[in-house]
Amino acid sequence: MKDLPQDKLVYTSDRPFWNFLISIPLYYFMFRTTCKTVELFYAGRIWYAVQFLVTMFFLFVCAAGITFTKKVYTNSRDKNVRFNFTLFGIPLCKDTIFKNVQYVSVYKNHTDRDFEVNIYLTETKKKSVSVYLDSKQAFKLAINIATGLNVDLLDATEKGNFKWIEKDNIK
């Protein structure tokens, strides 16, 4: 999807260089598996070709999982946020758009011990947009979204002690 003129890029996922180093052999083996799969289909060994096809899919999912890029665009006038996932510039899925965002929160899930970034569309209707293992990365995304939309941020990391971070106080 093309960037609309009023949309502003507020977040791009950071991939460390070692992710790309790990993905190189995965993509290489995926390519070799694809060649072998075609060869097996051509030779009439369908069962082996299907097994190689499954292996090829598994290799692709593993490699894509560590090399895809997430971009977040906001529109403060309409209070919309759009998530875009690409793999080397190729869209992986249709953009996910949330309209009329009221506020953003970072919630600590005490059962799983992870941090969720939630977008509230109404007081009771929320959508979880990302999950992180540490609060620093979760707050980085949440602050960027809240700043881009010009909305408040709710810090719900402590059980029973939720704190509002006013839009004027967001860095």
Image: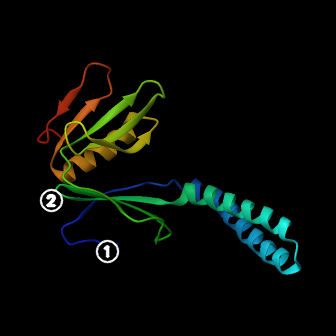
Residue at 64% from the left image edge and 62% from the top image edge:
60
Where residue 134 appears, x then y in whole percent? 43, 35
Rendered position, 171 above or below 35: above
Residue at 17% from the left image edge and 55% from the top image edge:
79
Quarter of the image for the N terminus: give it. bottom left
Q: Quadrant of residue 170?
A: top left
Question: Sequence order check: which comes first, mark 2 or mark 1?
Answer: 1
Q: Which mark is residue 52?
A: none
Assess disc 1: are there few (<14), some (14-19) or many (≥20) residues with their C-alpha within 10 Å of its C-alpha: few
Identify the amino acid type marked 1: Lys
Q: CA distance from mark 2 to mark 1?
A: 17 Å
Rendered position, 2 above or below 84: below
Q: Which mark is residue 2?
A: 1
Identify the amino acid type marked 2: Asp
Residue at 43% from the left image edge and 41% from the top image edge:
131
What scheme was used to colour the molecule?
rainbow
Residue at 74% from the left image edge and 66% from the top image edge:
53
Where residue 148 appears, x then y in whole percent? 21, 54
| Residue at which label 2 appears | 78
Helix, strand or loop under label 2: loop
